[in-house]
Structure formats: structure tokens, C-alpha cells
Image: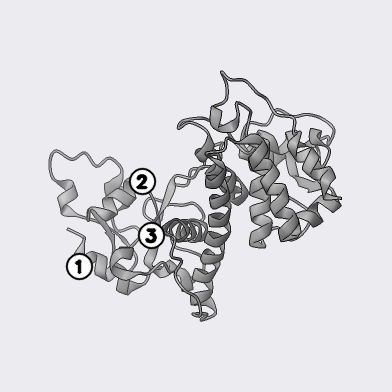
Amino acid sequence: MIEEYLIKFSRLRTDSGRDRYPATTCHRAPHKPLLLLSVMDRIAEGVITENFIRPTLDLAETFNLYITMVLPIGWKTSMAHPFPRLQGDGFWHRITNPGYDTDKGYNVTSIAKLQEIYAGAQLDDELFRFMLEPESSLKLRAVLIATYFASEIRPVLLEQSKVNVEAYQYSQQLLSELKDGIKDWETPKKLKVRDQGFRKTIVQLYGHRCAMCGIRMITPDGHTIVEAAHIKPWALSRDDLPANGLALCRLCHWSFDEGLMSVGKNFEVLVSRQAKKDPNILGPIMTFADRPIFRPTEELYWPSQNNIGWHRKSVFK
């Protein structure tokens, strides 16, 4: 019966303290309930279809979106904290990789270490079936939000769960538009859905790597250095397709938007002469000039020459 799991969800073993956690989380650690919300989002998206929860970067990204809503800016935490610790709540069963002891409690502080030690986790079969059912999943979600979060933040968390699912669906539509020629969908009306879906598509296609400088950095918390940049602004193009996007680090994104960097006809990096003027100190940027940009594996998702041609003509200095 679902009542058993509603009770277990309302009695998660969490740290607490007014001096450690804010009022938005009822002065309790929010990590376990937010991980469970993230798992249910991935199930609703159709990404998790079997009873095996892998500690992926995508799951960590969903977890991080929730964390930023309930904890103060600058708070350092990671999905690596709750993932193995849910074992003690009676329905989550961690599974280690070969060479590691399932019953041993390891000190895991980063996503990389989490993935090294744990292949994933399984839920009780009955609980997983409840999570697959929309009505039951809604009840489980409701008890988590009502138990561990203040009343003013509850609607925000419920809305974010909808955004997460809709953004994933939108990201899949963007890929299908080019690959399968599917066009019978509308651009989401919610800006947050569109932005999150576009970002998810571009960052994954480029493997978290900056198209221009090639840097790829992911923090222990699972945050990536790259952002999803429109080549031709959405306000002008109404275009979120991969052919109008680049994954760029913050420096290259700013330089691209300011017209100090662009992409040539042969997909090479262009650096503006304006960037070389005093008092600018370019550091390694000049070494990127004329190097080929990093692109997705499939040519279908490369930036289009129409879009980068527009950028060279209208933005590049």
C-alpha cells in the first residue's frame, strides 16, 4: 500500500538545526527529499524506465536546480551527499561497482567519486511502481514538499517539477526537429521551460565542452562551466534548434555576444582586431584564433552557416 511509503517519506532521517539550515527547509537538511523529487522528475520524463537509479550528471543537474531554490546562494552541496545515505530509510538500496563493499559506508564528496563507487541504486519494487503511476507519484511528491519545506516555497517547488519535465520534453523536440523532421509542436510559452530545454540540448550535444576554447570543467557538485548561447538571438530568430546554438564558457560567451569572437566559414575561431587593442590583455584568447571549433559528433547538429554568417556580419567587429 502507498500509505507505507507516504509514512516513510515523511520520516526521512535528515540532519536538522536552526543554525545550519534555513527556514525555507524547516531548518532540516533538504538533500534527501530533493533527490527523491529529482528521481520522480526523471521518471515522469521517461528517462528512468527501469528500477535502477544511476548517479548521472543529468540527475545531478535536476538536483542542483532544486537546491538553488531552497538554500542560500553560495551554499556548497552535492547529490553525492544524499545518494548513498538514503540507504538508511528502508526503501533505497545502493549498488556498488565491482571492488567496493555494498555494506560499507564510504565518504563520498563529489559526483566523480559517487560514480566511481556506486553503479546506482534500486528502490523497493512496489515503490517504483507507485512512482510510475502519475496519481501515486503526485501523493509521494506532495508529502515530501509538505513535510520538509516551508509553505511559501512549496508552490515554487511544484512549479519547478513541471518545468523540469516540460523542459526535457522540449529538448527532445529540438533534436527530433532536425533528426526526424517532426514539426507538429509549439514553442513553450514559459520562458523558463524554453531556456532550460535549450540549455539541456546544447550542453549535452557539446559534452559540457566550450566550442571555442575547448575547456571542459565540472565541479564536484556537478556544475558545468559552459552555457548555451544562441548564435542569432532568440528575440530575432525565435529559433532554439541546435543549429542556432553553441556551448560556450562564460568568457567565450561574453566575447561572442560582444562581437570580439565569432566562427568562420570553415568553422574556425575568429578573434576580432578590436580585441587586440590596448588596454586589453587577451591571455590565451589569441591562441584560439583559426583553430577549428569543437562540434557535436553528428553533423546534423552543427551550427548552421546561415546563423554564424549572420553573426559575422551583424555582431562581429
Residue 172 versus residue 296: which sits nearer the camera? 172
- Residue denoted by label 1: 313
The disc labelled 1 sits on which kind of residue? Answer: Lys
Q: Residues within 10 Å of mark 2 (few under 14, many from 20)?
A: some
x and y percent of residue 48 in the render?
70, 58
Element marked by disc 2? helix
Measure the alpha-carbon separation of dots 3 and 2. Answer: 16 Å
Q: Which residue is mark 3?
A: 293
Q: Residue drawn 57% across and 21% down? A: 20
Q: Residue 108 is drawn in which quadrant? A: top right
Dividing the picture into quarters, in which one does residue 266 lie? bottom left
Where in the figure is residue 136, as x and y percent of width and height?
75, 55
Q: CA distance from mark 1 to mark 2?
A: 23 Å
Residue at the spot of label 2: 250
Disc 3 versus disc 2: nearer the observer: 2
Q: In what element is the residue under mark 3?
A: loop
Rounded to the nearest angstrom, the CA distance separating label 3 from label 1 is 19 Å
Q: Residue at x 34, y 66 (%)?
A: 267
Amino acid type, label 2: Arg
Residue 33 in percent (x, y) is at 67, 39
Residue 288 spot, x, y in % from top left: 32, 52
* x 37%, y 61%: residue: 292
| Vertical comparison of 273 with 105: above or below | below
User: Which mark sits nearer the N-terminus, 3 or 2?
Assistant: 2
